[in-house]
Image (cartoon, grey):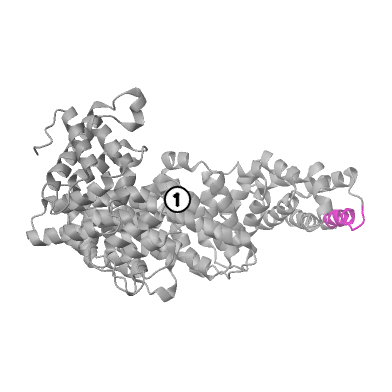
């Protein structure tokens, strides 16, 4: 075919597509005929497709091109291995333009298998940019195309991303980031991570790429799809395990960078969707890291990725002025999840000393997120007996006071009560610290009122209507009296401590609430045990006797002596083991009150109460005159 004829064919196509010409079937059918004639002349074939690609930028031509076979014909051209570079460029442009916001043309491309062809062409460096844009136009808001995503397509797009220069002014770079996000949202990652070992390594490679490249990505519109892709991958347990074994520091870097981006957004950020997306992705990363901590230990992290361990430490001790609150919170939660076993807790405290920056950074904070995260970590660290004193020495009780004072968030006073119980359990020295005075600058009751840390705990319980706090305070009191009953220490010190505890305002308020409630039978039983324990001393018996003047409380005691459970009174006695336990504690309590009252100078039990106690014991065949 002569060049003159070839030129005439091109002119014919241009004429048909002139502005104002009708988009009739006959005219477009003639274009299809001309294209077939040009197939053996790659140069002119490519020029014809360029004319069509330029025309398809006008929306009015897209539907007719699809309806009259041009899109289908072009799709078959993409798979031609003999097509020239220019033919590929122009046919890709044509497909991309025709699929922009046009679902019918997208469907034609899918049915012709061209999605896979575009995915293959993405791996060609000289075609990567246009192929990425075409793939974006096929995917965008079109679920049938997204469902055709595959591990191979992910691999090809990832390779394209890793091989290209990061340029936020390049639309194709943004399209590549968006495409990877779309593909991962559509893939069955759970299946792929168990059946395709290559996919797992590619997923980790992608995460490493994000960590290394993120600070060179200037546009959040490019960064967010990559961040979302990372969170999608980390929802999978196998991916988390692989990252934990390979490069945990990558996730830390991504979390820190994402947090910095979120922090840098103006308060009146113009795009609320962008901010919400960034917040959601950062939150997901935090959850993923907490999950990963559950499968790790301090030793394993230091052995496999010392960089990650150094980042954790830096997040704890970073200067407040750097405003990395999110990173401090992340470190606190991560380390708190590491602290699952005594060995790990002891290592974190004795070898790493993480409790010191935890307390120092958080006790002066008013950020409830910081307080909650740091408090949760300290609660776990305080479980081993060997940690209790060293944590308290670092100022834990000063931190606890901060938690107790924030009454608008019930979780924080509760957390303060939990940490207190952990610290005093089995530790006489921490009980002494609990009974020391709160510094004036921390006491909320005024400079002239000397209160102890125990007073602060009891006041927090009194202010709250949350039964969980009262229950935890009651358990704390039980822990205190267990220690006072068994500790090997100078008797004067023990007596002084007991007197201080009993002198605290409303020391039995939370215990009263525990024995009166019917939500938890074990907790109720513990309440009676606490009262029996306190009544073992003369001073304690006096306070318990005051409590027994309440008809409701003394009535409950009588029922416990008889082995009756209020919660199931209508159905008869409570289960045997619970009834026996409560009955034993109640009898010990009643006999202790009678015994201790005999030694009181100038005072005794009210006559009606004494008679009632003696009567209930006689009915159970217990001699009230013997102890």
Front-most of residues 560 and 524: 560
Look at the picture and state if 575 lies above or below 201: above
Residue 582 is situated, as x and y percent measured from the top left of the image, at: 23, 35
Q: Quadrant of the C terminus?
A: top left
Residue 624 is situated, as x and y percent measured from the top left of the image, at: 13, 36
Assess whether residue 311 is covered by the magenta stretch.
no
Residue 371 is situated, as x and y percent measured from the top left of the image, at: 39, 62
Hey, which residue is sitting farthest top in the picture?
Answer: 571
Q: Residue at x 39, y 63 (%)?
A: 405
Assess whether residue 15 is covered by the magenta stretch.
yes
Residue on which disc 1 sits: 234
Q: Can you see residue 248?
A: no
Q: Which residues are magenta?
A: 5-21
Front-most of residues 310 and 205: 310
Q: Residue at x 25, y 34 (%)?
A: 558
Q: Can you see residue 163?
A: yes
């Amino acid at each position: 075919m002569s060049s003159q004829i070839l030129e005439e064919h091109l002119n014919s196509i241009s004429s048909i597509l002139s502005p104002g010409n009708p988009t009739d079937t006959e005219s477009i059918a003639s274009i299809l005929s001309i294209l077939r004639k040009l197939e053996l002349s790659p140069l002119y074939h490519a020029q014809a497709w360029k004319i069509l690609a330029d025309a398809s930028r006008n929306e009015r031509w897209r539907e007719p091109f699809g309806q009259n076979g041009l899109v289908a014909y072009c799709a078959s051209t993409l798979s031609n291995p003999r097509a020239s570079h220019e033919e590929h460029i122009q046919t890709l442009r044509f497909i991309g333009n025709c699929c922009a916001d046009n679902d019918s043309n997208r469907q034609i491309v899918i049915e012709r298998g061209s999605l896979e062809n575009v995915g293959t062409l993405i791996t060609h460096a000289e075609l990567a940019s246009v192929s990425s844009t075409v793939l974006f136009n096929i995917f965008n808001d079109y679920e049938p195309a997204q469902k055709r995503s595959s591990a191979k397509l992910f691999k090809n797009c990832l390779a394209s991303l890793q091989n290209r220069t990061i340029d936020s002014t390049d639309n194709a770079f943004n399209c590549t980031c968006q495409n990877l996000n779309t593909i991962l949202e559509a893939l069955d990652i759970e299946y792929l991570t168990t059946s395709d070992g290559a996919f797992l390594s590619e997923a980790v490679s992608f995460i490493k790429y994000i960590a290394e490249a993120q600070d060179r990505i200037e546009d959040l519109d490019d960064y967010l799809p990559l961040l979302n892709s990372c969170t999608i991958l980390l929802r999978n347990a196998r991916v988390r395990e692989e990252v934990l074994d390979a490069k945990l520091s990558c996730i830390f870097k991504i979390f820190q960078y994402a947090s910095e981006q979120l922090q840098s957004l103006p308060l009146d950020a113009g795009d609320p969707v962008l901010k919400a997306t960034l917040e959601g992705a950062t939150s997901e990363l935090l959850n993923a890291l907490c999950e990963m901590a559950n499968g790790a230990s301090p030793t394993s992290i230091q052995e496999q990725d010392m960089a990650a361990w150094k980042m954790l430490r830096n997040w704890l001790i970073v200067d407040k002025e750097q405003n990395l609150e999110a990173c401090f919170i992340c470190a606190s939660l991560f380390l708190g999840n590491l602290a699952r076993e005594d060995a790990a807790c002891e290592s974190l405290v004795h070898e790493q000393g993480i409790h010191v920056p935890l307390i120092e950074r958080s006790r002066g904070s008013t950020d409830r997120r910081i307080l909650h995260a740091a408090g949760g970590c300290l609660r776990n660290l305080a479980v081993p007996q060997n940690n209790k004193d060293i944590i308290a020495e670092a100022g834990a009780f000063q931190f606890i006071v901060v938690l107790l004072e924030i009454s608008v968030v019930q979780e924080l006073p509760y957390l303060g009560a939990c940490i207190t119980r952990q610290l005093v359990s089995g530790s006489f020295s921490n009980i002494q610290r609990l009974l020391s005075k709160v510094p004036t600058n921390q006491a909320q009751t005024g400079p002239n009122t000397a209160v102890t840390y125990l007073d602060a705990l009891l006041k927090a319980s009194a202010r709250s209507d949350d039964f969980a706090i009262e229950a935890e305070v009651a358990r704390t009191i039980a822990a205190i009296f267990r220690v006072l009953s068994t500790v090997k220490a100078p008797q004067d010190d023990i007596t002084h401590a007991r007197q201080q505890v009993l002198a605290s305002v409303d020391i039995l308020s939370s215990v009263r609430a525990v024995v009166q409630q019917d939500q938890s039978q074990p907790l109720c039983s513990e309440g009676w045990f606490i009262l029996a324990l306190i009544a073992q001393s003369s001073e304690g018996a006096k306070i318990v006797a005051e409590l027994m003047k309440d008809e409701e409380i003394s009535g409950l005691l009588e029922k416990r002596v008889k082995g009756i459970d209020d919660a199931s009174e209508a159905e008869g006695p409570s289960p045997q083991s619970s009834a026996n336990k409560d009955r034993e504690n109640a009898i010990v309590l009643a006999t202790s009150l009678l015994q201790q009252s005999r030694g009181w100078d100038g005072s005794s039990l009210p006559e009606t109460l004494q008679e009632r106690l003696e009567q209930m014991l006689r009915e159970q065949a217990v001699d009230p005159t013997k102890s």
